Image (cartoon, helix red, strand yellow):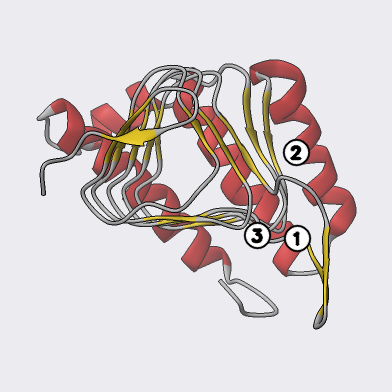
Amino acid sequence: MDKQSQSLLSTITLIRSDMQFRCDYEHKQLTALRVLAFLTNHAVISQILYRFQIFFHLNHLGIFASIFKGINSLIFTVNIHSKTQIGEGLLMLHPNYIFIGKNVVLGKRCILAQQNSIGPAYVIETEAGVSDQGPIIGDDVLCGVGCAIFGNISIGSRSKISVNTAVDKSFPSNAILIGVPAKNLSLS
């Protein structure tokens, strides 16, 4: 999503991929009836609000991006920064108290439980300038309830982050993270 703009068709395609991943997760078929049922699901509505927030942001319609972000924050307590990149197939299990800060990259088919906080730890001054890079999280990562992921770190694809885990350093793919601070329990 490094483009300067995003088409409405691309936004709808992302929303459809989110719904398809939800169906895959629930072992169900994506049908027109299921899409209608999804429009009563708080998590799906929250994700749609986020996708349109990004559509407006990338098309330089900041006031509309702010309105969609504000609605999502007010109704669902989901606050996702407009400079966050989330791949296709996002799945929020429960849209409650989710915070994703600036410059976070979330891969494809990631699953977020409620009360997740993901973002830059703080602004770092380096020789190259100021950095507020957030975590880069790979594809197919599961973030359990109440996990916190902060800093200029990376978490490899197919990792699982346990309930109430605090991640402040990088981990490879297929990690099983648990604890404060996070430790990798993976045998591979």
Where residue 160 appears, as percent x and y from the top left, is: 28, 36
Where residue 44 appears, as percent x and y from the top left, is: 45, 30
Which residue type does callout 3 highlight?
Answer: Phe
* Distance between mark 1 and mark 2 Cα atoms: 10 Å
Q: Residues within 10 Å of mark 1 (few under 14, many from 20)?
A: many
Which residue type does callout 2 highlight?
Answer: Lys
SS type, badge 1: helix
21 vs 37: above or below: below
157 vs 1: above or below: above
Q: Which residue is mark 1?
A: 57
Q: Residue at x 73, y 58 (%)?
A: 56
The reply to whether callout 1 and callout 3 are in contact (CB within 8 Å) is: yes
N-terminal of the pair, mark 2 or mark 3, is: 3
Q: Residue at x 86, y 57 (%)?
A: 62
State the residue in front, 137 or 4.
Answer: 137
SS type, badge 3: helix
Q: Which residue is mark 2?
A: 69
The answer to whether residue 162 is left or right of residue 128 is left
Residue 55 badge: 3
